Image (cartoon, helix red, strand yellow):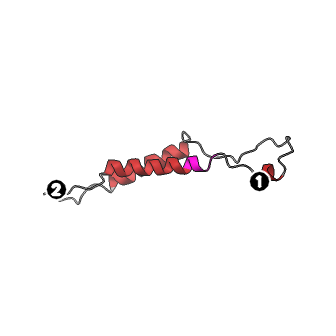
Amino acid sequence: MSVDFEPNFSDVTETIHEIIEHMVKSVQNFQRVEHQLFYEDEGLKKRHISSVQLDEERVLAAKERVAYVVEKNSAGPLK
C-alpha cells in the first residue's frame, strides 16, 4: 500500500521557495520617508531603504532550511 500526496513534496518546496522570493522582491525599492518629505534636497544619499537580495546568504539559507524541513517531514512512519 502506498500513499500519494498532491501536491507532491517537491512542489510544496518549490511553492514555498517562490513565496520567499516574492516576499524578498516585495520589500525592495521602498523610498525612505526623508526622501518623500524632503524630495527637493538632492543631498540625500540613500533614497531607498536597504533590503535583502535574492542571492544573499540569509535568503539562500532560508530556502535550504525549507527544503530540509519538508524532506524530513515527508518520510512515513518506520516499520
| Furthest residue in direction left, as rendered | 1
Q: In front: 11, or 60?
A: 11
Residue 79 higher or lower than 29, as above or below: below
Q: What's the residue type where badge 1 is placed?
A: Val
Q: Residues within 10 Å of mark 1 (few under 14, many from 20)?
A: few
Q: Residue at x 33, y 54 (%)?
A: 72
User: What stretch of residues is rendered in magenta?
Assistant: 24-28
| Residue 63 x, y percent position in the rendering | 46, 47
| Residue 54 x, y percent position in the rendering | 54, 42
Q: What's the residue type where badge 2 is placed?
A: Ser
Q: Would residue 50 be counted in the magenta stretch?
A: no
Q: In front: 40, or 27?
A: 40
**Residues under labels 1 and 2: Cα distance?**
56 Å
Q: Quadrant of the N terminus?
A: bottom left
Residue bearing mark 2: 2
**Label 2: which secondary element:** loop
Q: Residues within 10 Å of mark 2 (few under 14, many from 20)?
A: few
Residue bearing mark 1: 33
Residue 76 higher or lower than 10, as above or below: below
Q: Residue at x 23, y 60 (%)?
A: 77
Q: Which mark is residue 49?
A: none
**Label 1: which secondary element:** helix
The earlier-in-sequence mark between 1 and 2 is: 2
